[in-house]
Image (cartoon, rainbow, N blue to C red):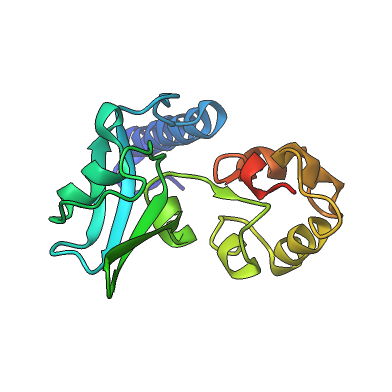
Amino acid sequence: MSPPGGHKTYLAILLVAVVVFSMLLRRSFFGAQPPRSDAPATVAVEVSGEVPSPGIYLVSRDRATVSNALLTAGLSGIEADGMRKLESGESLAVVKTENGFRVIAGQMQASARLALGLKIDVNSASEEDLMLVPQMRPEFAAAIVKGRIDRPWEKVEDLAQIHGIGPKTVQKFEEFLDASPRGRK
């Protein structure tokens, strides 16, 4: 019994299926990731607290200082640590005090860092933060946090020591995680 429309319709459907399957197979094999730059031209900094325009700002790398980030958020005249260079993912919280303003430096929340394409540190992230990473399981997050108690993780590849995390999973995690020296004792 032949399909409605004859053999030509059957061959056309088969040809389309083969082309679509080939495209999907090629995409999964070669990946569709854009090239990454090691040194972005801008630095993403969050400014919050007692500033006219709180938010996350992209500041050019050559102007990425505490003073310039605060100025971008509408606050000028802050001297404390003003010329310190900033790295992507840092946050500056401005608190009003009796003597003026105080700037508290820290890290952006993990969700903001990941949304901006920045990595989170396995040596300081909470279990909840780690659960934001694609393919992260609760038992992996718990083991990462527990594993750094005695000795911080030296590199993301060391996560392969955790039962259930193999080389392919580590490779996927490397896109979202980092083992920062800042988290080490």
Measured as percent of width and height from the top left, residue 73 is found at: 17, 54
Q: Residue 109, located in which quarter of the rendered image?
A: bottom left
- Is residue 61 found left or right of 178 in the rendered image? left
Measured as percent of width and height from the top left, residue 54 is found at: 21, 62
Measured as percent of width and height from the top left, residue 162 is found at: 84, 52
- What residue lies at 15% left-to-right and 62% top-to-bottom? 53
- Is residue 180 found left or right of 22 in the rendered image? right
- Is residue 53 found left or right of 116 in the rendered image? left
- What residue lies at 30% left-to-right and 30% top-to-bottom? 61
State whether residue 180 appears in this view. Answer: no
Q: Residue 131, located in which quarter of the rendered image?
A: bottom right
Q: Is residue 116 above or below residue 144?
A: above
| Residue that sits furthest to the front in the current view | 99
- What residue lies at 38% left-to-right and 36% top-to-bottom? 85
- What residue lies at 36% left-to-right and 46% top-to-bottom? 81
> 180 and 16: which one is in front?
180
> 69 and 121: which one is in front?
69
> 30 and 25: which one is in front?
30
Q: Residue 175, located in which quarter of the rendered image?
A: top right
Q: Is residue 8 above or below residue 143?
A: above
Q: Is residue 56 above or below residue 93?
A: above
Measured as percent of width and height from the top left, residue 29 is found at: 56, 29
Counting the numbered discs, the total is 0
